[in-house]
Amino acid sequence: MSVERDRLVELRREFHRHPEPGWREFWTTAKIVSEVERIGVDELHVGRDALADERLAVPDKDELEVWMDRAREAGADPDVLDELSGGWTGAVAVVHQGDGPTVGVRVDIDGLPREESTDERHEPAREGFRSETGAMHACGHDAHATIGLGVLESVKESDFSGTFKLFFQPAEEIIGGGKPMADSGHLDDVDYLFAIHIGLDYPTGEIIGGIDDFLAVTQFYTTFEGHPGHAGARPEEGRNAVQAMATAIGNLYGIERHSEGESRVNAGRVGGGTATNIIPEEAFIHGEVRGETTDIRDYTFRRAKQVFEGAAISHDCSADVTIEGEAPSAESDEELVESIHDAARAHPDVERATRRGSIGGSEDATFLMQRVQQHGGLATYACIGTDHPGGHHTSTFDVDEDSLTLGVDVLTEAIVEASKTRP
Amino acid sequence: MSVERDRLVELRREFHRHPEPGWREFWTTAKIVSEVERIGVDELHVGRDALADERLAVPDKDELEVWMDRAREAGADPDVLDELSGGWTGAVAVVHQGDGPTVGVRVDIDGLPREESTDERHEPAREGFRSETGAMHACGHDAHATIGLGVLESVKESDFSGTFKLFFQPAEEIIGGGKPMADSGHLDDVDYLFAIHIGLDYPTGEIIGGIDDFLAVTQFYTTFEGHPGHAGARPEEGRNAVQAMATAIGNLYGIERHSEGESRVNAGRVGGGTATNIIPEEAFIHGEVRGETTDIRDYTFRRAKQVFEGAAISHDCSADVTIEGEAPSAESDEELVESIHDAARAHPDVERATRRGSIGGSEDATFLMQRVQQHGGLATYACIGTDHPGGHHTSTFDVDEDSLTLGVDVLTEAIVEASKTRP
Amino acid sequence: MSVERDRLVELRREFHRHPEPGWREFWTTAKIVSEVERIGVDELHVGRDALADERLAVPDKDELEVWMDRAREAGADPDVLDELSGGWTGAVAVVHQGDGPTVGVRVDIDGLPREESTDERHEPAREGFRSETGAMHACGHDAHATIGLGVLESVKESDFSGTFKLFFQPAEEIIGGGKPMADSGHLDDVDYLFAIHIGLDYPTGEIIGGIDDFLAVTQFYTTFEGHPGHAGARPEEGRNAVQAMATAIGNLYGIERHSEGESRVNAGRVGGGTATNIIPEEAFIHGEVRGETTDIRDYTFRRAKQVFEGAAISHDCSADVTIEGEAPSAESDEELVESIHDAARAHPDVERATRRGSIGGSEDATFLMQRVQQHGGLATYACIGTDHPGGHHTSTFDVDEDSLTLGVDVLTEAIVEASKTRP
Amino acid sequence: MSVERDRLVELRREFHRHPEPGWREFWTTAKIVSEVERIGVDELHVGRDALADERLAVPDKDELEVWMDRAREAGADPDVLDELSGGWTGAVAVVHQGDGPTVGVRVDIDGLPREESTDERHEPAREGFRSETGAMHACGHDAHATIGLGVLESVKESDFSGTFKLFFQPAEEIIGGGKPMADSGHLDDVDYLFAIHIGLDYPTGEIIGGIDDFLAVTQFYTTFEGHPGHAGARPEEGRNAVQAMATAIGNLYGIERHSEGESRVNAGRVGGGTATNIIPEEAFIHGEVRGETTDIRDYTFRRAKQVFEGAAISHDCSADVTIEGEAPSAESDEELVESIHDAARAHPDVERATRRGSIGGSEDATFLMQRVQQHGGLATYACIGTDHPGGHHTSTFDVDEDSLTLGVDVLTEAIVEASKTRP
């Protein structure tokens, strides 16, 4: 039931050439829509129809406009672009094919705001499909979109019986798209959900049935506001926002560990002030907290807010905290882990079938998994190994295109087998 | 009109042998009362009669009891001790001797809570008048009390005409005695007030007419209260008072300087916690802030309180601030500076007569000076130089006993001359 | 094979009445020696003979003397006390009883430096066996010593075949005794080691085969040394040890978490400075770091040392770090966990037999366990549940004396069964 | 001897329309050269000829190029621009006019990198001479250059006898131009140096003979370099440059005050990190320290370097400190203060002639003053009051153009009188 390898490679390279950051996947969504329509589905929900009303981390209008223009110039279908206006990217495709359970697959489609390597040893540079947008598919979401489309085609040609839903989720990297897609209603009748990721330091030929250790995460943007003063002539008139920020950074990392599991804090990007001779009146911390459970994350964030408030008071400033994005923790269900595992073991090109794996990071697929599980369904987050020369999020990240076919095959097999069970 | 040098030396050594910290000058006050009565005065106000009702930095009952017992054992007059009960130490002696202005002298009488050196090169150790109480006269208040008594005797024998008041102020080192003595009413009719200090890095033979740069000071005791937790098993249950304290220390020293003058902060004594494996639930900072003006001191203390509150909030603790003692800044009046200067220049043993000097520290004599100045009188804070081998407050501090006579002579001369003016 | 319940209760209460902190268990060791001799053993190693030469966290001479005197007054055998001089407490008793493996039991015997409750609801207070020493058995080591003696008696009367070694380890609470006892040589031929603890929030009637999550721990004592200066007159002469300490506290808690497991840090007891008006020249942090593995603990401690050095340099001070005590992490071996589990299930009064448990804390029994495991033997750390009204280390901690018999029975049964296997 | 008011106003508005930041005063210098040549002088030293080889705070090539192009487009003389290539801006004009002392005047010519107000109440906006470059003359250096040229013309027409040197100093705002101009050799034979500033919160009609309280200043740029790590998956791999920066900020402000005079510290502009989920590998502090004396500034900077080093070590990072600019403290000489004072009192439009004033800030004119004083000459820093609606360095700063004539008149008078004395 396999899709042509060449077709998958070609698709993936097209996506790779046009990476777009979260909520700006205009060209990408239009391309997906065109491919989905080519394959043919029973329902196709695009943009606002694929998402709940409340979104997080949406860029401002000017930024959206820049990427919309770029997509238009790159030849995206203007009618589809109209539907995406305002950053309503992403899509849900649905196929009804006989009686049976509802099986979902979730792939994410956004790129990262970073330059891609021009090094000749970097295949996209050498082979001419390096990013043309300034952003980069440095985490393999080009491969995810491709595998999703490949699975759609394969499932349609298979003896799958039931309803198949394919979720093209936007804005994963900024933890923005998972929640509104989970809340869209499209997940509520899903019996089995397969979320997938490529790579994660597992080599080509290895398939992992389920990832377990997602850390719940909250990304925040905290601003401190004080009052300027001339550093030489009137220091006492200043209320120093940079001192407040520094106090907060120190105490943020010092939040007590939690005995029930891992926690993390990071002040990932900070800044403040304008000139050496002015007591700084503004400063910010763009950061995140994580927890092995959602409760531990919440404990840590509650403490972080006290840290911000206390730091502001210490320096006669005010602090304002905005949540930019968040995702809960999640666990993969045993039944679906086994179903991937069985499909992997049965495939001749799979060299290693592993049941459980670990990433120690966060993912907003957990919103979709949680939604399905809360409605009585099962979910797993499977990994398709791939040899990747550079690490995830680095400028030389690339995937081994052999893993595209492998991913489509194993996933399709697991889906078809799942459709034979009754939840 | 000189008092015998031998008598002064003997007296000073008796005081030196019995140092008592602030509000515990039981033996010292009783000794002063006995000497004053020997000399003979018209009025003698002791304890409660010498002080306003509100005192600062009074030790607890047990501590007072220990020193009361020690004074009793050392042979202090039990009737006087009764009057001092509760730590009401200090005295005011008054002589009426003809018409004329009211002239005051203020000396302080308390010791410091530190061990005295046993080094043979330290004269009190070698000559057998080293402290027997565990405390130490490491700032020359033994000499001050002695000079005060010497001046009293000399003034009585002189052609002084007017009212002479001698203030034996307790609890200077803990900034506790100045305010209640200033508020006692005894200062309100003083026309000219001479406060004195010995040493201050000026050598024997030098006399300074007035000190100008007193820093206003506030001493505080801040406690942080959190909640304990087992550092291994339940760190998240702890609310860490030591972290709050550390945050406060960092930010305390970081309070912005003031453009209108000097400021100081110090976390002089700090502590917290009980055991390595318990998240600390209690901590304290015993410290002070100073300012070149009372306003700058107040600015700094206002900021310090924000620092304490912010640090507590940062670590989910509470902070409580108690003011232990305080003193304003003050300036010496030109007329009295000149009067000391004239007396010094006229004395054959004075090698250097200096008008104005500097100490860069704080003193609660400023309360008495301020009171007199607010009532239209004049005040100065004069210094009697003395060679002192160890620095003030160190275990080898000592005075050159030659400066005792010099101090009595110059001060008496200035007082007698002042009595000839009409304010 | 049971020992009389009354005898155990009486013994436990005697120990309870005479708690002694680490390396000061003079009366306790003498009492143990006397009981062991009454029961009769083949070898008895006391003090220096039970320990390697290098000990940690030994109190100073004066402190040892105080407790030695107290032990003498309480009637301890002077000959035994002589052997313990210098704080060489603890003992190892050995019984040879036919062929078979060498089986060890480790109990700890020290108390905690805290007052015991006088509340009538606290049974030791009500029944008259409250501590008479000022210290307290607030962690059940009185029960451990008692169970150890009970097991010795039971094993001797049983059909145990092999060598039985009973380790009475001193100084567990200060992480001082585990290492020198582990290095004594007495552990090197042990095939099976059972370390035990009572309580740990498990109720009477529950027995846990093995505890797994010991955190490796290092206790440190860090001193900062600067230079004093008058806070008003010469602040720039000071090199502020309290600022260095505060900087270190902030950064200590801010050491990055480790992705491979839990870590902990605590500045449990801190202090510095002498007076509000002196820039503090000395300060200290008495604290600890822990890790889920010994490597994580070492990573954290390595970072802590950088924190101390950096803080000292920041304030022109010096820092000196002393390791006071340390213990590795450890895991209980499956075979012995099962052996306790089997014995527990077979006992009629055991209501709940649990295989694995958790404490989230540290224990220097891990030194002995590690030593045995490194020599090819097996070890477990079993827990005898007991209803305890107050939490461990609190003033109302107490044990349910019913658990004494239960502990002796289950442990003896496991030991006898173990002696029938061949390692 | 007055220059036409209209001519001065016209000139000042031309300068105002073309502000250029430090070392980028290409159009400005060319304009000055053209005006000086029109007036006629005996020597004119431009660019490299006006400066020593070593300069501080020079922008990079690209930045210089941008401003050079802008100057060319604005019609600056290409031949002069060639001489200024590489940012060698500024000029020294010399007139020999009979026997007599060498008298110098120093004015600075650079603008600030900030937008100018477009508010109609702001006269340059209303009258059409608002900045066209994006930078702004927000500190009156346009008026300084104008007054300099006016004085040159007036002195030539006067009975001045001696050598007159006019210093057009670049790059004052970035503390970059003072030192190389002071070291150029042109100052070494100056007998009397008048540096001037307009405004400083003194109103039109007030002239101040000399400013005294310049704080010595050092501007620094400190970078912290660590190592990145994924904040979720591998925090322990990170060496956190933002934590190092925060520790340094806290301790920087906490450097002990100095008893001999004022000090200042400021972390005026700070930043670090790239993304919320990456442990930050880089951070910086762009700041300054000041002191009432050069020694106090040096003490504070020495301590600041320890703070940076200690913070880096605390977080396993490295720190690198670059001095960007510095200026010593300075005092105005009594003789020249009097000379300005006399000229001011004699002028009919001067409403208030003040001898001494204060700014509480820093200035690199102090380098030139120090040079002259070290070679036996005298120097003062005089202030020409002007009503300025917005504060210095704000977007609505403006000068009252009446003060231009006043400045030229008083300065010329003082110069002419000075030329009659013999140093």
Image (tube, coloured by chain):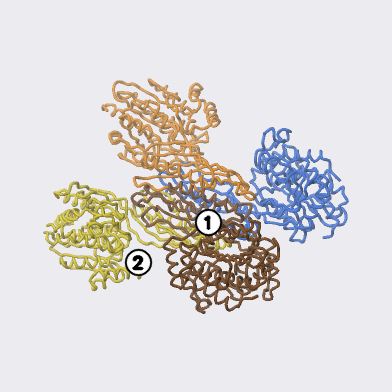
Chain colours: A yellow, B blue, C orange, D brown
Name the chain under label 1: B
Q: What residue is drawn where x is 42% and y is 36%?
A: C326
The local secondary structure at tag 1 comes to: helix
Residue linked to disc 2: A59
Picture quarter containing residue B120? top right
Mark 2 vs mark 1: tell me if same chain. no
Amino acid type shown at disc 2:
Pro
Nearest to the observer: residue C324 or residue D162: D162
In the rendered image of this protein, does residue A201 appear above or below residue A282? above
Residue C298 percent across, percent down from the top left: 40, 40
Residue A59 percent across, percent down from the top left: 35, 66
> Can the viewer see residue C409 in this picture?
no
Q: Is residue C223 left or right of residue D195?
A: left
Of labels 2 and 1, the one closer to you: 2
Amino acid type shown at disc 1:
Glu
Name the chain under label 2: A
The local secondary structure at tag 2 comes to: loop
Q: Is residue D155 left or right of residue C296?
A: right
Residue linked to disc 1: B309
- Residue B400 - label: none
> Can the viewer see residue C103 in this picture?
yes
Density class for disc 2 (Cα within 10 Å; few <14, some 14-19, many ≥20) is some
Residue D393 percent across, percent down from the top left: 53, 67
Q: Quadrant of the N terminus of chain A?
A: bottom left
Q: Quadrant of the C terminus of chain A?
A: bottom left
Q: Is residue A281 left or right of residue D208?
A: left
Q: Check whether the beta carbons of the residues at disc 2 and disc 1 lie within 8 A of each other.
A: no
Residue C104 percent across, percent down from the top left: 35, 28
Picture quarter containing residue A185? bottom left
Density class for disc 1 (Cα within 10 Å; few <14, some 14-19, many ≥20) is many
Number of marks in picture: 2
Q: Alpha carbon of mark 2 to alpha carbon of mark 1: how far?
A: 37 Å
